[in-house]
Amino acid sequence: MFVYILRRLLLMIPGLMGIVIITFILSRVLPGDPAIMLAGEQAPPDVVEKIREEMGLNDPLYVQFFHYVGQLLQGDLGFAWHTGHTVLEDFATRFPATLELTLVSILIAILVAIPVGVVAATRKESVIDHISRVFSMIGACVPIFWLGLILIYIFYSNLGWAPAPMGRISGDINPPTDITGLYIVDSLLTGDMVALKESLAHILLPAICLSTGTMAIVARMTRSSMLEVIGQDYIRTARAKGLLERTVIYKHGLINALIPTLTILGLQFGFLLGGAVITETIFSWPGIGGYITDSILATDYAPIQAFTLLSAVLYSLINLSVDLIYGLIDPRIRYE
Amino acid sequence: MKKQKWLALLAAVSMAFAVAGCAENANQQPAEGEKQGDQQAEAQSKNITIAYSEGGQTMDPAEANDLTSDTLVLATYDQLVTYGVKTVDGAEIAKTDEIKPMLAAEWKVSEDNTTYTFTLRDDVKFHSGNPVNAEAVAYSFDRVKNSNSGSFLYGMAAIDKVTVLDDKTVEIKLQRPNHMFLQIIAMYTFSVVDPAVVKEKGDDYLKNNAAGSGPFKLEKWDPASEAIFVANKDYWQGAPKVDKVTMKFTKEASNRVMLLDKGDVDLAIEIPPKDVEQLKQNADLTVRSDASNRILFLAMNTQVKPFDNVKVRQAIAYAIPYDKLIHDVMYDQAKQLKSAVPSNTPGHTDAGFVYKHDLEKAKQLLEEAGYGDGFSFDFTLGSGFQDWEDDAVLIQAELAKIGVEMNIEKVARAQFLQMQKERKLTSYITKWTSFVNDPGYHLGFLLYGKGSSNYGNYVNAKVDELWEQANNEPDQAKREELYKQAQEIITSEAPWAYLYEYNRIVGMNKDVKGYIYYPDEVIRFYPLSKGE
């Protein structure tokens, strides 16, 4: 098992190298000149030229590339021109917010979609099944920005239940002591109940908004794999043995049906990380999403490259853990 | 076995909560609201929250060149001189051609208008406690000279040399007489920074921190979420009337409108024109919509066929559906532009403006130019502004009626700016704001033959001559006369089809007082007050 993990981690290296090269090239191919963006629209050409020189943009591409790789190897992700900070600083303040939002969204998707999928499968063609089908369909195709605005309009503007869509915590509340950067975890760790309540209230709407697509897919996936499993001989055997229906469904059925669901969840993580862009903009969530959009608009290379790299690492790690969990769920799967 | 595991987990979780309960609580004070209820309510009324769209890029005065960054700078720094204020229809707006003392108590100008001697106030201290002196002024100007963003303004001001005469006197020599000099150094770029702090903490310190003498001190700036300023109680002009200003960065415009409507922010900028009417229904709000210096125009490259023909350009100007643009696209939150120079700028004239939506006249002009059968041309649309897109489509439809085919090519903003700089665009729509409210500045960039932003390549020897002559003319009235002549020539030659002047729309709570409109569109926090 240990050898397996090590091998997988080593296999990540060529993949990441590919990503470094591709994002480097792609971001240089992006039309637009960062020096113009930095100098401001009214700046004359000689100022722009001076900035280009300073930023090393006049160097040949391969020189820029080796310079970039050299920086990377020293753990330096570069400098974000459009914010005036190092990429590392910017990521440190913004990435935890996105991660927290993504994790909570996945959690919501799991908590809602798996039970719904199971119920829909076991009561096939019932009212519940049809309702869940309709909701999955809506959930899968509703645009996030529209849903977000509607949620804000109903729950903040009309009913007044949700806090103002301004960030992760209200202005007059201190954020919890910074340990992991995830407000919910930090406030639990420090026992800051005020901050906990606040951060939960703030994260709820954006997380629901972000998770709808995943929820729909996971629910449908759970339903179909559940249906397949329920038709298997061992389920009939379990029933014949006189086991409780609940035990049959959850212990013998669900556990076996979870593998495809888990695969989907692993894939969805990457999707959510990207989907956070729109949600974050709508809810003024101080995450990485809006930052990356701005970076692209400003043709600011370093943050785009760093984000792609970071996402790739995270995504590979999540995939690895999904593969490992397979083995926990299904003892027949072994890693050599 | 299974059950034991669950029990153990439950026990662990409840333990964690129990321990947590005893742990230090970071939020004790807002948790028990009642113990300081009244005090808090009173304190709250002196805080102002403002919704902005963008988080800003830098706190460094010499590098700031976006609206939020400029606002951060003006809240924390002072300049040598500042703009006057006048009242128009009961609302206060800036009078940028009237320059008032700020850090400089007074100044003298030499006979030949090239040497300015400033005498500094002696009661001003930086936030650090260091005195504001002549050395600090010289140091700050030097930073601007060597900066990336601000250096062009240094050149624009035509500053030759800054000399410290004594602790409180500084002399600035110009390369030539420059009537815009004082207006330029009143800008945020020329804020006076504390040299001692910068030297101690390094030049990069100013990117994220303030070292000024201004009315507010920076408490927190996180471009992803908010910036918080606290009042500088010892400010030399008197403590600000509010204790705290919070800028909330809310990108989504409809959210800014909702937050304002619900009273969660006191002031919101960049309100979409379509929401103005709805906000006006709310009795708790005031909506200010001031004519700004921001203009929008359709530029035609005069070096490219068929726009090298003046009649073709005039025909286009006659085909623009002016009323539709202002009413349907801008919901009447804009005003028709009738000169290359905005109507707010001293020296503006709309003399010679004859264009109105008249397709017959347009057709006739095309006929005269030899394009009776029409023609087709490329139009480049930079992304990022919805109204540009709407305008382009409306204009395209009108041009089709006179047989002119306008091919709209949409490109990303960054690409658009780059293509503009290469000066190869056939035609495009763009906006422009002249930070210095002067026709010389404005035309010098945009329509002077050697202007650095003259991307339509308009060259007219007479206009250039008038501009150069005006540039050396110390008498304001004579100068404006020259600029007026230049405007008339430009209008008749139509290198641009003038579209509109944007309004600056700001929504605010009725309690908020002291909002002053400035042509640079930056809100100064110092005059703001709340309540009573």
Image (spheres, rainbow, N blue to C red):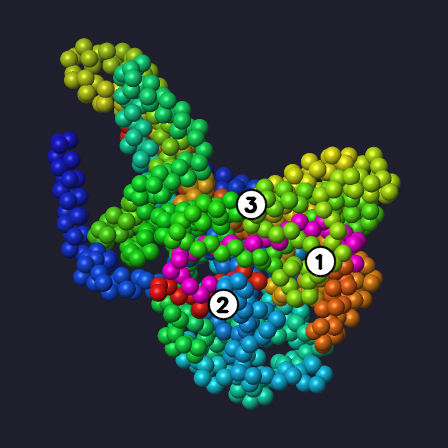
Amino acid under disc 2: Leu
Left or right, residue B485 beside residue B380: right
Provide the residue designation for mark 3: B331
Q: For numbered disc 3, what is the local secondary structure?
A: loop
Left or right, residue B349 beside residue A304: right
The answer to whether one can see residue B50 in this image is yes
Q: Quadrant of the N terminus of chain A?
A: top left
Place of residue B456 in the rendered image (x, y in percent of width and height, measured from the top left): 74, 52
Amino acid under disc 3: Tyr
Q: For numbered disc 2, what is the local secondary structure?
A: helix
Instruction: Specify which label sits upstream in the sequence, 2 or 1.
Output: 2
Q: Quadrant of the C terminus of chain A?
A: top left
Mark 3 chain: B
Provide the residue designation for mark 2: B74
Q: Is residue B198 magenta?
A: no
Q: Tell me if residue A180 comes above or below residue B442 in the rendering.
A: above
Left or right, residue B173 beside residue A125: right
Amino acid under disc 1: Asp
Give the magenta range: B489-517
Between B448 and B342, the one nearer to me in the picture? B342
Provide the residue designation for mark 1: B350
